[in-house]
Amino acid sequence: MVATALIGLSIAMLLFLLAAGLTLVFGMLGVINFAHGAIYMLGAFGAFEVYRTTGSFWLALVVAPIVVALIGAAMEVVLLRPLYDRDHVEQLLMTFGAILVIEEAVRMVWGLGYRDLPLPSALEGSVPVLGDQVAVYRLFLLAAGTAVGAGLFLLIEKTRLGMVLRAAMSYPTMVRALGIRVDRVRTIVFAVGAALAALAGAIAAPIVPIQVGMSFTIIVDCFVVVILGGLGNIRGAIAAAILLGLVQAFGQHYFPSWIEVVTYVVLIGVLLIRPQGLFSAAPARKA
Amino acid sequence: MSRSRWISSLILTFSIPLVAVAAAFASDAGTQYLIALILVWSIFAVGFDLVFGVAGILSFGHAAFFGAGAYVYAVLTLDYGVSGLAALGAAVAMGTVMGALFGVVTLRVTGIYLALTTLALAQLVHHLVEVKLKGITGGTDGLAGVPRPELFGIDFYDDRMFVVFVAAIFFVLMFANAVMRASPFGEVLRAMRQNEVRVEQLGYDVRLYKLSAFAISGGYSGIAGGLLGALVMYVGPEMTRWITSGDVLIMTVLGGRGTFAGPVLGVVVFEWLKESVSGYTEHWYGVLGIVFILITLYMPGGLIGLLSRLTKRRAQPRRPRRADAERASGRSSEAA
C-alpha cells in the first residue's frame, strides 16, 4: 500500500517535472512544445552517453540537461523566434516538425534498440517505510522532483529574475523599452524548459528502457496532466500529476491491463464535465 | 466562394480522376499501385483538411477514424463475408460515428487543447485496437488477406481496375467537397477559422457546425481507411498510430491547407519524396521533417500558396511583395 503510493508519487514527480517545463514554456512564451517528449528522450540518451564515457551517474544528471538546454536554446532561436506573432497552432506544427527531426537524429546516432543505464550504487536496494519495502531510487526521485519544483516556484514567484521574466512575457514592449532583451529572455525560458525535460529524462533513465518510443508514451501522459490541470497552472499540474501517478501506480497493482484505458476515461470524463481542467478558475479556453 | 474558384474546383474534380486513370493504363504495375495509393490518401487528406484547413481546427486524432474504417472493412469482409461495397459503406458509417464522438468530447475545448485532446483520444483507440480488441483486430499482427471489393464481375485485383474504382469514389467525394465548400456550410466553417466568437455572435450554432465538420471528415477518413485496407490487402495497428495523423497533417500542410487541390498535391509530393529520398537514405522521415519545418516557416500557404503567389506576381508585377505574399497565403486576415 505505502510502497504503491510512493511509486505513484515518484511517477507523479516525473510527470510534474515534464509538465512544469511544458507549462513554463507555454505560460511565458505562449508556445505548446509538442517536442517536449522528444527533448525528454534526448535527456535520457544524453545521460546514457555521459555515463558510458565517464562512468558517473551524477555527472550524467548534470551534463545531460545542460547540453540539452543548449540544443533547446538553438531550437528557440532558429525555429520559434520567427513564429511568435502567428497563431498558436503554427507553433504546434513547428514543434511537431522538430519531433520528426529529433527522433530521426536519435535513431541515426543510437539506433532502434534498447539502452539501459545502471542505478548508481548509492541508490540501489530498498528501505523499509511504514512497514513496506520501498526502492531507494523512488525516494530519490521524489526528493529530486520536490526540490526542483520548489526551486522553480521560488525562482519565478519570489526572485527579481522571476519578476523580470514574468513582466517580459506580459508586457514585452514595455520591458524592452526598459532595456531588457526580451528575445534573450525567451531563449532562456525555452532552454530552462528543455533542461527540465532533459532532467526528467536523465532521472528516468535508470528505471525505464531508453529507446525512441519513450518520447511518445510520456508526452501523452504529460498532455493528459496539462489538460487535467489546466495549462499554465502550475498548482493544477502538480495536483493532476499526483492524481495520474497514483492512478497508474495503483492501476499497476490492481488492474494492470486497464491502466491506459482508465487514464483516458478520466481525461474524457473531465473534459465533458470541466473542460477548463480540474483546477483552473478560468471559465473557457481560447488558447 | 468566388465563381472562378468554384469553376476551377470543378475542373480539378473532373480532371484529377481522369488523369489518374489515364496514367494507370499507361504505366507499369508499380506505378498503378502508387496511383491508387495517392488517390486513397488524397481522400483522407481532403477529409482531414475540411476540419484543419477549412474550419481551422487542428485535429491530431484522424488516424483513429482512418484506422477504424480500415478495421471495419477488414473484419466485415474477412470474418462475416460481407460484400466489399457494403463493408465500405460500414467504414464510412464507422468513421462518421467516430468523428462525431470525437467532436462531442472536444466540443468545449479549442485550439491547442483540442489538438492535444484528439491526440489522446486517438491514442486510446490505438490501444483498444492493438491490445484490448486483439481477438477481433489481430493485435500487433493485424489482419492479412483482406479482400478487394467486387462489382459487375470486374477484377479489382488488377491494380488498373482498382485505380478506376478508387478514382470513381474520389470523383464523388471531391464533387461533394466542392459543393460543401461553396455552400453556406463551407462559408460558416471558413468564418469559424477566422473568428469563432464572431460567428457565434451572428447566431450560428458553432458547436453543431464543428460537430458536423468532424463527422463528415470522419466519414471521408473512414472510407479512405477501408480503401487502403483493400488496396494493400492488409490492415494493421500502425494505421491508428499518431504517425498516421502526423502524415496526413504533413501532406496537407505541404500542399496547402484550406485550398481545394492542396491536400491532393501534398499527397503526391509526400509520396514522391518518400520514393525518391528513401532511395538515398533510410532516414527519409528526418528529411521530411526538415521540409515540413521549412514550409511552416517560410511557406504557410504550402505549394499551392507558392504557385498562386508566383502566378499573381507575374500578372500584377507592381504589387508590393509582402502584401502579395500575405494575400496569396490567406494569412492577412487571420494573423490577429
Image (spheres, coloured by chain):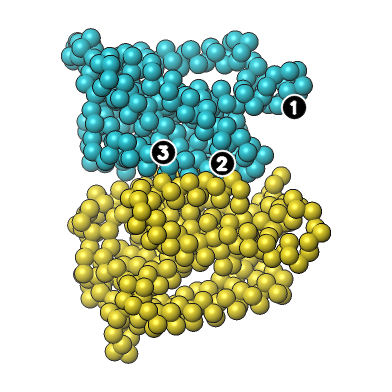
Chain colours: A cyan, B yellow
Towards the viewer: A149 or B228: B228
Say whether residue B26 is left or right of residue B319. Answer: left
Residue at numbered disc 2: A91
Q: Nearer the viewer, mark 1 or mark 3?
A: 3
What's the residue at 38%, 61% (across, down)?
B275
Residue at numbered disc 3: A102
Please count the marks in the image. Answer: 3
Q: Residues within 10 Å of mark 1 (few under 14, many from 20)?
A: few
Q: Residues within 10 Å of mark 2 (few under 14, many from 20)?
A: many
In 3D space, how far apart are the residues under numbered discs 2 and 1 (Cα atoms)?
A: 21 Å
Residue A184 position, x and y percent, is 62, 23
Q: Is residue B42 above or below residue A282?
A: below
**Kind of residue indicated by mark 1:** Thr
Say whether residue B184 is left or right of residue A38. Answer: right
**Kind of residue indicated by mark 2:** Gln
**Kind of residue indicated by mark 3:** Ile
Identify the secondary structure beneath mark 1. Answer: helix
Q: Is residue B168 above or below residue B207?
A: below
Q: Quadrant of the N terminus of chain A?
A: top left
Give the letter of the chain under mark 3. A
Residue at numbered disc 1: A173
Q: Is residue A131 above or below residue B258?
A: above
Residue lying farthest to the bottom in this orientation: B152
Say whether residue A185 is left or right of residue A240. Answer: right
Q: Is residue B305 above or below residue A162?
A: below
Q: Quadrant of the C terminus of chain A?
A: top right
